[in-house]
Image (cartoon, grey):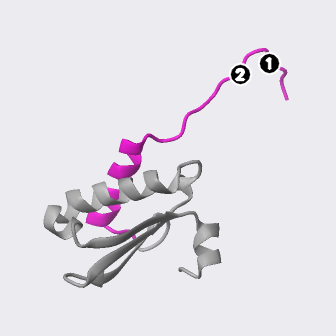
Amino acid sequence: MPVRTTLTRTSGPTEEDLKNELLDELRTPKTTGEPDVIIQGAAPAGVHLFVVWSKWAGLEQVVRSRIILDAYEEWRGEQEALRVTVSMGLLPEEAKIMGIS
């Protein structure tokens, strides 16, 4: 392995990148892989959104939730987004601990 004198840092995806990728998944779901989107419940009782995704690493829960809500609102509209009572982004390990699969 070479020895270098400079450090190259790579940055992760931006919040906008994550929102757009999640929005693509909502519009055209894949049959396997991440993100794993779970939509539980229905209006008017309330909707719970869980997104299991390795790309959440390093992001605080409040940021994850905002990205999920923004993508959901763009997909379903403001009225449907107002019915969301839980919006939680989880790493796969976190989802496993919580019993969400």
Q: On the picture, is 14 further left or further right than 54?
A: left
Position of residue 73 relative to residue 13, above or below, is below
SS category of the residue bearing label 1: loop
Q: Is residue 51 above or below residue 13?
A: below
Q: Nearer the viewer, residue 48 or 55?
A: 48
SS assignment at label 2: loop
Rounded to the nearest angstrom, the CA distance separating label 2 from label 1 is 8 Å
Report x, y in % for residue 76. 19, 66
Tell me if label 2 and label 1 are in contact, CB under 8 Å. yes
- Residue denoted by label 2: 7
Q: Which residues are magenta?
A: 1-30
Judging depth in this view, the residue of 36 and 65 nearest the camera is 65
Front residue (pair 78, 11): 78
Residue at 24% x, 85% y: name it: 45
Residue linked to disc 1 = 4
Q: Which mark is residue 63?
A: none
Reply yes or no: does residue 22 show up in magenta: yes
